[in-house]
Image: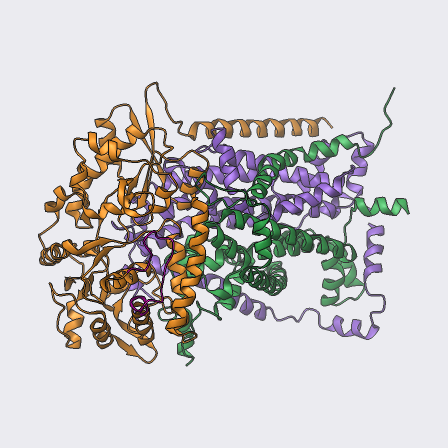
Chain colours: A orange, B green, C purple
Amino acid sequence: MTTRASLIRRGAIVLGAFVTTSALLAGCTGGGSGGGSGETTLDVMVGAQDLSDEQIAEFEADNPGIKINVVLYDATRLNTMLAAGDPPDITFGNAVGSANFNARGLAADLTPYLKDSNVLKEDDLQPVNDAFRWDGTKSGDGPIYGIVKDWSQDNALWYNTALFDAAGVPYLSDTEAISYDELLEIAKKLAVVEGGTTTVYGLGMEWQWSLYGPIAAMVAQQGESLFNDDLTKVDFTTPAAQRALQWFVDYGKSGAGPTSLNPLPDGSDFSTFAAERMAITQDGYWFGGNFAGDDALQTVRFAPAPTMGDTPVAMSFGGAGLWIPEQAKHKDAAWKFMEYFMAGPPAEARASSGWGLPSLKSLADKLPQELPYQQQAYQVVQGQLEHTVPLPDSPYIGAGLLQDTIDKYLQQAIKGEVSVQDAGAKLTDELNEALAQGVDQVG
Amino acid sequence: MARKWTRYPKRTFYAFVAPWALGFLLLTAAPMVYGFLVSLTNFDGSSPRYKWVGLNNYIELFGDPDMWAALARTLAFTVIVVPLTVGGSLGLAVIINRRLRAVGLWRTVFFLPSVVPVVAMAIMWKLVFNKDSGILNAILGVAGIPPVAWLIDPVVFYSLIIVMLWGLGGGMIIMLAALQGVPVELEEAARIDGAGRWAVFRHVTIPMISPILFFQIVTGVIVALQVFVQPLLLTNSAGISTVGGVPESTTLYMVQVYQEFFLSNRFGYGSAMLWVFFLIILGLTLILLRSSRSWVYYEVDTDAEREGAAR
Amino acid sequence: MTSTGTTTEERATPAAPTTRRLKDASRSKKRPVATIYILILLLCVFFVGPFVWLVLAALKTPAEWASLPIRILPEDAQWNNFVAAFTDMNFIGYAGNSLFLATTYSVLITLSSAAVGFGFARLRAPGKKALFLIVLATMMIPQILTLLPTYILFSRIGLVNTYWPWILWGLAASPYMVFLFRQFFSSLPKELEDAAIIDGAGWFRIFATIFLPLSRPVLITSFLLSFTWTWGDYIAPALLLDLDNTTLAVAITAFYQDPNGNTIPTVQAAAAVMYIIPVLLIFFFTQRYFVRSTVSSGVKG
C-alpha cells in the first residue's frame, strides 16, 4: 500500500515539475514586446529571407530604441491580425492587389511621411508605385498607401538562343515588339514533341502565376480595358477580350507550352527553362537574376513584351512592396524602416543584384552591367519604360478568385467543352457576381 | 452522519472530466458562437465594415448548386474511403502482428507515410503523378500504357483516394494496439475448441476489438468528411496551391468552404456552410452511435448495466 | 474469466458445422510464410516509393529534377543540398522548438485525455451521455471555424508568440484521444477495480495505479500520434508564432528560396527528409512497447 501511494506521489511530483518547467520555458520563449522602457518593438511582416540578420543589426544600430521582430508573411495571418485589430506595424504586399486593403481603409496614407522625408521622395518614385494609390473609386490616382521594393515589366520575354539556333528560328528583336500571333507560330516551331510527351516547350506563359495580367495587357494593347471605370464590372465578351482569350485557347490546344491542364511539376518556368527544355518564357527583367552565376545558362536574351494591337504596353503584374496598416501601433518607427528598406543599403543591394528594377528613379544606375546579357536586358528595359502602365486593380475581387475563374473557363475552352464566346460570357457573369458581393462588402 | 457510500460518486466523474470541460467552454464553445454570429454577416475577413444579413447566408446556401455538388462528392468520397482505410489498416495490423523478422522495420515503414509533413507530401506526389515527368507514368510507359493525366478531372478523384490509402499507417498502429489488447487466452481457447483461423478472427478478435474498430469508423468518417489538405496537394501549382486551383472532382465540401473564405473573401457565407456541415456530421455520427449498440461489445458498459438493472 | 468465456462463446455462431472444424484443423502449420513476406514487400514499395523519390530529389540539382526523360538517379549525389538545408537557416533552433512543443503537448494531452477517457468509461454520473456526445461533436468542428476567434482570444490575453496556447490545448484534452481511451478502458474487465474498491481506494488511485499502467500501448499510441501531429502542424504555429520561435514545419516552407522567392525544390526536399527522420526514429524505438498486454494476468479467475 505504502509503495503504491509513494509511487503516485512521486508521479505527481514529477508531473508537477514537468508542467511548471514547461510553463516557465513557455513564458520565457515568448520574446516579449517592449522589453526595456522607451524601447519599441516593430513587428515587420515579410518573407523569411527578405531581411537578413546583418540588415536587422544595421537598422537597429542606426535607430537605437527600435527592435525588429520578424513575423513570417502569411496571407491568412495578415487578414486575421487585421480582423483582430492587431496588425503588424509594416507588412509585405503587392501593389497590384493593394486596392483591396486601400478601399477598406486598412492602409495608412504615406503622403505626409513622404513630404517630410529626406531620403524617400514622392517624385523619385517610379510610376509603378502608382498601383499603390487609391482615390476612393479607382487605383492609380490619389494618395499613396505603399511603396514598391522592386518590379519588372512582367509581360516581356526571355529566350534561349541555343534552342533558337537548333530550330533555325531568327532571334527576337531587341526593340520591336513581336505580335502574339507570330509568337505562337514561332513557339510551335520551337516545340519538340515526341509521341505524346513534350520534350521541349516552345513558350511558357507562367500560367500558374497570372492569367489576368497577360490578358489585361493584351486588351490594353488593343486600346481597351477589361474593367469599367470604377472597377465594379468586368467584360470578357468585347472583341478585344475575345481575341485575347482565343489566343490562350489556341496556345493551350497547340501543346507548345505548359498550361494548367499539363503543368510543370514545380509550378514555374525557371527550372524547365534552365534545363533547356523551354525556348521562350514570359517573365520580367527579374528573371535574369538567375543567370548571373558562372555555371548558369549563358545563351539567354531578353526581348520586349509582345503585343496584340497597335499600342505597345508593358505591365508589371505585381510590384512587391511594403505598406503600413492604419491600425499599426508604431507608425513612425515603421516609416523609419520603410526609409531604410526602400532607400537605404538594402535597396542598393537589391538593385545591383539584378533581381528586379529599382522602385526609385535615383537607383536606376545601380543595375548590373557586367555580363553581356545584363547589358542587353537593361537596354530593352529602358526602351519599354515609356509605355509601362500599371495593371488595373479592383478592390472588389481577390486576385486568387480572378486567376482561378479565368483558369477554369480557359480549361473548358481548351478541352473544347465550350466555345470561346461562351467561356467569355460565363466568365463575365461569374466575375460580376463576385464583384457585386465585393462592392457590398466594402460598402 | 456518514454519507451513504456509492460506488460512483458524481463528484469524481466531474473531477475527471473537468479539464476537458473547461477547455471546451473557452477554446471551442465560445469560438463556435462567434462563428455562428459571423455567419449572420457578410464579413470579409479583415475589414471592420461588415453588415448584418440575418439568415440570408443560410437561405442562399440551400439554393447553391456548387454546395450540393460538393456535398454529394464528399459523401461519395467518404463511403469509398472509410471502409477501405478501416479494413486496410486492420489488415496491415494483422499482417505485422506476428513475430516476423525485422518486424520493427516493417512497422516503421508502414507508419512512415503518416509522418511525412504536408509540404514534403506535396512535392512527392506531384513528382509521382505528373503527366510528363512523373514516375508513375514512366512505370506505365514501360508496360506500354500511354501517359495518364493523374492530376486533372476525372482521374484526380482516384488519385486522391490513392493518397488517402497511403496514410493507412496511422490507423494501423491504433489497430495494432487494439489487437495487442486481446487476451491470448481467449483466442487459444477458441482454437482448442477447433475453430479455424478465420472463425477465431471473426468471432473472438473482432468483437474484442470492436470498441476500437468503432472508434476508427467514427473518426474515419469525421476525418473523411473534412478532408481538405490532400486535394490542395494534388493540384498543379508549386507546393500547396491556391484553393481555387483544385479540379472539380476533388472539390470536396471543405475545399468549397475554404474557397468561400479565402478566394471570395466571404467569411459570413463560409461560416454558414461550416455550421450546416457541422450539423450534418453530428447527425451522421448519431446514426453511427445508434447502430453501434448492436455490434460493439464492451467489457464494461456502464450504460448497458444501468439499463439491465432498470429492467 | 469463466464468465467472459461464456459470453464470447455465446456470441459465436452456435451452428458452426462440424465438417468445417475438421478441415480447418488440417490446414494448421503449413501456412507459407513466404507469401506474407512478398505481400509486405509489395506494400513497402507502395508506402516507401514516394519517400524514396523524395530522397532522390534531395540529391539532385534543380536541372536534373526537372529533366525529361526522367532521371531516376542523380549523376552526382548532391549531399551539399543537405548541408545547405541545415545551414541556410537555423535548422537546429527550429527543430528544437518543434521538439519542445511536440513533447510538451503530447505528454499533457495524453495524460489529460486518459483521465477524461477513464471518467467516461468507468464512472457514472447524470449527464455523462450528453457530455460524451459533446466530446464527439467537438471532433467534427472544422479547425477553420475556430481559427479567427481563437487568435483574437489569445491575442487579447497576450499569448501570441508564446508557447502557452499549446500548454492550454494540452491540458484541455483532445476529443480523439478521449474517445480512444474511453474505448480502450471500456474493454477492460470490471474485476480490475473491484479489489481496489474493497480495499477502500479512491478512484484517482485506481486510475493511476491500475488502469494507467495497463494502457501502455494506448498511452504510447496517443503520445506518438499527438507528437507526429504537432511536429507536422503548420496552421497553428503560422498563426501564433513569429519568426524567432516558430517551428520547423513553418520554417521549411518559408526558407530555401532563391532571390526572387521561388523555393529551391531540391534543398527543400533535403530539409523535408531531415524533418521526417526524428519522428521515424522515435517510432522505431518505441514500437517495441506495443507488447502483448498482460490484461488477463491482472485478473486471475
Front-lying residue, B293 or A225 = A225
Seen in the picture, residue C244 relative to A183 is either above or below; the reply is above
Residue C148 left/right relative to A141: right
Q: Residue at x 40, y 78 (%)?
A: B142
- Main SS category, magenta section: loop
| Residue A142 in magenta stretch | no
The image quadrant that residue A250 belongs to is bottom left
Bounds of the magenta span? A225-242
Residue C12 left/right relative to A326: right
Q: Residue furthest front?
A: A229
Seen in the picture, residue B13 relative to A288 is either above or below; the reply is above
| Residue A231 in magenta stretch | yes
Number of marks present in the image shown: 0
Give percent across and percent down for residue A112. 25, 31
Give percent across and percent down for residue B296. 75, 55
Residue A406 left/right relative to C126: left
Give percent across and percent down for residue A102. 35, 42
Q: Would residue A339 be seen by someone viewing this image from the given angle? A: yes
Front-lying residue, C248 or A289 = A289
The image quadrant that residue A201 belongs to is bottom left
Quadrant of the frame with the N terminus of chain B:
top right
Give percent across and percent down for residue C222. 59, 45
Q: Would residue C202 be seen by someone viewing this image from the given angle? A: no
